[in-house]
Amino acid sequence: MMAAFPPLLPPAPRLLLLLTVAAGWVGKEPAAFAAATAGDPAPPGKIAVIGGGIGGSSVAHFLQQHFGPQVQLDVYEKDTVGGRLSTVTVNKQQYESGGASIHALSLHMQDFVKLLGLKHRREVAGKSAIFNGEQFVLEETDWYLLNLFRLWWHYGMSFLRLQMWVEEVMEKFMRIYKYQAHGYSFSRLEVLLHSLGGDTFVNMTQRTVAESLLEVGVTQRFIDDVIVAILRAGYGQSVLVPAFAGAMSIAGAQGNMWAVEGGNKMVCSGLLRLTKANIIQATVTAISLHNSEGKTFYQVHYEDEEGQGSSFYDIVVIATQLHDSKNNITFQNFDPPIAEFPGVFHTTVTSIVHGYLNSSYFGFPDPKLFPFASVLTTDTPALFFNSMDNICPVNISGVFRRKQPQEAAVWRVHSQRPLDKPELKILFRSYYSVQVTEWQAYPDYESAKTLPPIILHNNLYYLNSVEWAAGSMEMAAVAAKNVALLAYNYWYHDLEKIDQKDLMHKVKTEL
Ligand SMILES: Cc1cc2nc3c(=O)[nH]c(=O)nc-3n(C[C@H](O)[C@H](O)[C@H](O)COP(=O)(O)OP(=O)(O)OC[C@H]3O[C@@H](n4cnc5c(N)ncnc54)[C@H](O)[C@@H]3O)c2cc1C
Ligand SMILES: *[C@@H]1O[C@H](CO)[C@@H](O)[C@H](O)[C@H]1NC(C)=O
Ligand SMILES: *[C@@H]1O[C@H](CO)[C@@H](O)[C@H](O)[C@H]1NC(C)=O
Ligand SMILES: *[C@@H]1O[C@H](CO)[C@@H](O)[C@H](O)[C@H]1NC(C)=O
Ligand SMILES: *[C@@H]1O[C@H](CO)[C@@H](O)[C@H](O)[C@H]1NC(C)=O
């Protein structure tokens, strides 16, 4: 996930095997969702999705897959489809300014790309290194064996233990695809995590990644030098993020990342086009509950260019953050009232800079000799940025080559706050343009200690609660599939498919 950190070791063969096995599951499902038979409740008439990011667009797709094409789907988007997946243009080429890279084992994202006839964008090889404000503390070389040797020399067993820990988490996490292919859904994140990895997984949302790694024998030194840098580049946060989110970020740093040719946001627009959902360009301001003739309806109130309006729905999915005061959606007539969501979001500033790197700052007076495409950083007060990458456009033709370090290139710098002119002048000898986006990128993982609910009311769902376990495109897609299944299973009273225990066993015997 997160900022690409090229592979220090190739992926373990076991993970590759897992990929092939798990890939077989995806796409096997429709039979499990035969059309509703007589005696079942009538299908829902209208469903609203609030938010047109990857969460909202994938839930629209999955809802339609399960409920069928006759259900009317309205997707409210106040800004642009894609949300935190977005590009900026430099010299007529687009570059990812938000969510950039996708892990090879992201099976829903893989599926979407296939379904939409999109292409994977290959990763152009480039080396990375970790900078501590004065010098590089860890450098990747051209020599795989030398990398291995260096890591071994510096960190002994820590690296191996880290690999094993991450691999175990990923292997357990991948169970979700099997469960979902069999139609199983979860009403709370804790239950979902428990079904994948037992108490250990639930605990991993409550303890820090540093604690968990120390426990499996990773040294403090390795954490300070390497893990800190990975989490700063990924979440822009410290090793105090919860272990589950941390593991997902570290998995992304192992390499094997890809992106969507033409831009990741194309998945969102593609899925919405495929579902033929009505995209309503409006800001949702409130959701109110109405009961009539024993049925429950949700009235979605919105504001658009022409003023205020509202519509009634059987099912509503909120696919944006709720705790974020910017989103301001109020809930009316709910008894008991829908509680406030604690926590705040972490700001990540993306600066896309077209210019000449000041390699002297990194200890390379001759720019031609600067060997790195990615610079990660340790936690040092003197450092005013988290990471920087020499990035490729979203469309790469066959002849593309990365710019040489002495040439003007496009760099993506992530920082906690906007860079001022003097700071830009430190990183770049000179530049043509700077485009700044201030994101509410991820939850500030230390700001809330409990996971928010998925179900806010009978047929009112909160997709983005998942980000408090871990935020990424694939986590949004996993949550979207879960919400679509949950909505379907509740609507047709198929309670067997909700919060079932012992799924590993059930899924095996159902084969
Ligand atoms: C700088 C950065 C780097 C990242 N890097 C990666 C990465 O490498 N890999 C990865 O997997 N993830 C990455 N992420 C995270 C990833 O982008 C997000 O987890 C994911 O895109 C979230 O999608 P979403 O649909 O849940 O939310 P969003 O994309 O935030 O979508 C919510 C949508 O709802 C709309 N909306 C909000 N309120 C309302 C309202 N009241 N009415 C109507 N519409 C509303 C918003 O305009 C928005 O379009 C990164 C994020 C950032 C910011
Ligand atoms: C999870 O945490 C609880 C309380 O902190 C602890 O009692 C339990 O042993 C932990 N379980 C695992 C599997 O780590
Ligand atoms: C970029 O790639 C996308 C997806 O393959 C394609 O639709 C688009 O036309 C391409 N754009 C350019 C400028 O090549
Ligand atoms: C949030 O709601 C308050 C009170 O209704 C309003 O004053 C404010 O402008 C809203 N903020 C946004 C960003 O819509
Ligand atoms: C580049 O880095 C050097 C060394 O840190 C610094 O002295 C110089 O001011 C920086 N900026 C430019 C434009 O050279």
Image (tube, rainbow, N blue to C red):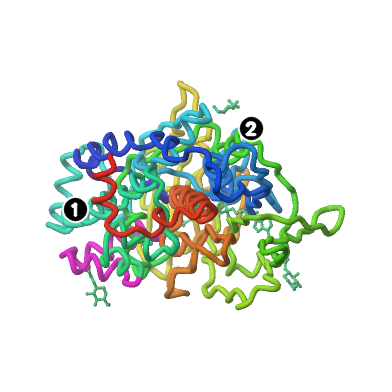
The residue tagged 1 is: 164
The residue drawn where x is 29% and y is 53% is: 503
Amino acid type of the residue that numbered disc 1 sits on in the rendered structure: Met
Q: Quadrant of ligand 2?
A: bottom left
Report the magenta residues as a range: 206-234
The residue drawn where x is 43% and y is 68% is: 382
354 displayed left or right of 252: right
* Residue 133 place in picture, x, y as percent: 38, 61
The residue tagged 2 is: 92
- Magenta span contains residue 298: no
* Residue 27 place in picture, x, y as percent: 41, 34
Amino acid type of the residue that numbered disc 2 sits on in the rendered structure: Lys
Earlier residue among tags 2 and 1: 2
Q: Measured along the vertical axis of the image, is residue 110 above or below residue 349?
A: above
The residue drawn where x is 83% and y is 59% is: 308
Identify the disc placed on residue 32. Answer: none
274 displayed left or right of 246: right
